[in-house]
Image: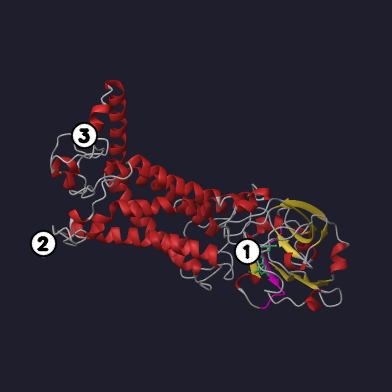
Amino acid sequence: MRDDDPRLPSSPGFWRSPLRGTWFTSVLGLVLLVGITVLFVTGLVSYAAYNPDLSPVNDQTPGKGILGFYLFSWPTDPHWLYRFTQGLHVTLGITLIPVLLAKLWSVVPRLFALPPARSLAHALERISLLLLVGGGLFEFTTGVLNVQLDYVFPGSFYPLHFYGAWVFFAAFVAHAVLKVPTALRAVRRRQDERDGREQGGRERDGREQGGRERDGREQGGRELGGRELGGRERDGRGQGGREQGGLVTPRPVAPTVSRRGALWFVGGASLLLLATTVGQSIGGALRRTALLAPHGGTDPGAGPNGFQINKTAAYAGIDPRETGAQAWRLVVTGRGGTVRLSRDQLLRMPLHSSALPIACVEGWSTADQWWRGVRLRDLAALVGHDGDPPDLFVESLQRHGAFRRAALRANQVADPRSLLALYVNGEDLSPDHGYPARIIVPAAPGVLNTKWVARLTFGDL
Ligand SMILES: Nc1nc2c(c(=O)[nH]1)N[C@H]1C(S)=C(S)[C@@H](COP(=O)(O)O)O[C@H]1N2
Ligand SMILES: [Mo]
């Protein structure tokens, strides 16, 4: 079996699109360089925002070990912080899907190239490519499935996505170190050519020869308009297919679209995804444009409680009899002892208002809502923590489900905007938004805003 038999994908002649080449791959690669770096950083930040180092219940990736070295105290300012970082993470991730796919398509001949390894160094390079391609597909797939299908990996999305991110990003950095110089050169050279062409006005002539086959060698290094390809070595060393790192086909079929046109197509697909996603993070009237948003189809209704609902009371198994005035008591514990408070007793405490959003890990968020309730630090003071409140462990009436408990950090408890909310937008909380009482904390991820709160324990986490 010869590796130049064009019937086999391992042969450069098997891949015949004239679009492939260093310039096309480089443009996509540079977009991904920036985009994936932002995804990695916002992803790590999202993980830190859960306070996983604070309490086992927040720690969705218990075996992370040194990968959690960077964890830090999530701030409470600006109050839209998580709304921004996670909206960016999810929206950007979805928007980059066409770029990722186009990039993989543009280098697919290299992925099939044989022999699998010519040397130890080559073997290592190909293993890193496997981690890169596999890791990239894995991260994008798990991310999209989690957002769209609502926790298809029960309890295990976080470790998968988190470990996957580290593996993927390590391979990504290695790849970038090797390829960025080439990519920058390819893109810059293309700019030189464009400048030269404008001056010389030689575009017309060049174009007439475009796509016409003179010999395989020349063709390999040629672009549709007959212009020289970005990655073509100036000194003319090597053959078309080789000098391009095997990207340029030695047997091009007639082009149906220019490289530039193909890029516009990829960019257009990205913009379409962006336009049908971003509304979920902006909210307001734009919510309705978020056709791809996971909860895009459900209408939260109108009125004060008419903003997005994640899990309904029915879904969480909250029995209305447990939340009534007779049955429900908030149990607050601290170093000074335990108090049990009815909703009426809470309403007689000093009430405060805060304008804060709900921002879910899935990327959607609400505009600021007006919450009214008792400050968490006032509740801490009630059970012996005056002045300097400690960490807080919150438990819901809910009996099953990952988000029925959460731990808040001392800085979150101390913030005067952090409330045990009883009202929203001037009305009692609706059952679905957590009646009789829920947590709301500035800048925090939605998971920390526990609904149907039953018990607060200050200190000793
Ligand atoms: N008890 C309980 N509280 C919870 C949840 C839950 O499943 N159970 N989900 C959390 C998540 S993931 C989010 S994004 C917010 C959503 O709040 P909302 O439904 O009022 O918009 O509630 C949080 N509080
Ligand atoms: Mo959420």
Secondary structure of the residue carrying tag 2 is loop
User: In terms of depth relative to the viewer, which is nearer, 369 or 347?
Assistant: 369
User: In terms of depth relative to the viewer, which is nearer, 448 or 309?
Assistant: 309
Q: Which residues are magenta?
A: 389-399
Image quadrant in which you'd find residue 115 = bottom left
Q: CA distance from mark 2 to mark 1?
A: 57 Å
- Residue highlighted by disc 1: 447
Disc 2: CA contacts within 10 A as few (<14), some (14-19) or many (>=20): few
State whether residue 264 is above or below residue 129.
above
State whether residue 334 is above or below residue 86.
below
- Residue reaching furthest to the top: 199
Q: Is the shortest distance between ligand 1 and the CB of mark 1 under 8 Å? A: yes
**Residue 2, labelled with which disc?**
2
Q: Is the shortest distance between ligand 2 and the CB of mark 3 under 8 Å? A: no
Tell me which amino acid carries mark 1. Answer: Val
Tell me which amino acid carries mark 2. Answer: Arg
- Residue highlighted by disc 3: 209
Q: Earlier in the sequence, mark 3 or mark 1?
A: 3
